[in-house]
């Protein structure tokens, strides 16, 4: 299990990073994954996409998604990761929630490059649920080198209040 110090490290990493892989499943049980740019805001990961995209259709149908945030901390070996299941909520771009975040500048990196002009654009709010799994975060480098399988993985139950 992960301690509070490491949970804080995970939350800081989520806030600092901006790329993740988003995994969804269609109603026909076909898996799909795609890399997306995100913003971490108030305990949820936000992305922007076309409402007609496969990932948006899958999340609209299921309300679920899997998220994996990879990042390098060491020049060799596998990347560190944070991965979790999330509640996926499609949020219209003109909703009060989205407007408040946009006006506060909290969705800046996902709302540029013409995203707000997309006729079928939509924000997706991904809120972690259940257990958050990590690899490498909060582990001493020497321990990771000596025993990557035993020392690398950590898990904790996501606490919305801590986010």
Image (cartoon, helix red, strand yellow):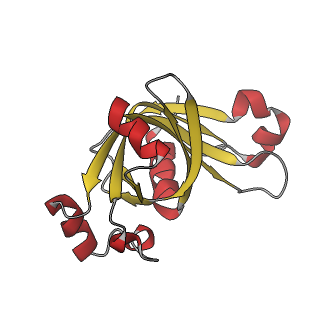
How far from the left and from the top, in percent, is residue 31? 57, 30
Residue 141 is left or right of residue 61, and the answer is right
Answer above or below: position of 117 versus 124. Answer: below
Residue 27 vs residue 113, the one in the foreground: 27
Q: Look at 80% across and 44% down and name the residue there.
A: 142
Where residue 55 appears, x then y in whole percent? 47, 43
Q: Is residue 138 visible?
A: no
Q: Residue at x 17, y 60 (%)?
A: 95
Name the spot of residue 111 as percent of width and height, x first: 39, 71
Above or below, comparing residue 114 to residue 42 in the picture:
below
Q: Residue placed farthest to the left in the image?
A: 96
Residue found 83% across the figure and 41% down from its top: 145
Residue placed most toward the observer, 110 or 152: 110
Picture layout, residue 157 above or below residue 138: above
**Furthest-top residue in this view:** 29
Question: Residue 160 versus residue 120: which sits nearer the camera?
Answer: 120
Q: Is residue 32 visible?
A: yes
């Amino acid at each position: 299990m992960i301690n509070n110090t490491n949970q804080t490290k995970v939350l800081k990493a989520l806030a600092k990073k901006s790329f993740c892989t988003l995994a969804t499943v269609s109603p026909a049980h076909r898996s799909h994954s795609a890399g997306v740019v995100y913003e971490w805001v108030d305990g949820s990961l936000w992305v922007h996409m076309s409402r007609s995209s496969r990932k948006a259709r899958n999340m609209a149908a299921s309300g679920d998604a899997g998220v994996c945030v990879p990042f390098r901390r060491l020049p060799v070996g596998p990347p560190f990761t944070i991965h979790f299941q999330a509640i996926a909520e499609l949020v219209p771009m003109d909703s009060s929630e989205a407007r408040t975040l946009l006006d506060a500048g909290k969705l800046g990196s996902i709302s540029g490059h013409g995203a707000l002009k997309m006729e079928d654009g939509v924000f997706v709010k991904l809120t972690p649920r259940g257990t958050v799994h990590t690899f490498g975060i909060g582990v001493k480098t020497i321990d990771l080198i000596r025993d990557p399988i035993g020392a690398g993985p950590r898990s904790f139950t996501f606490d919305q209040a801590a986010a």
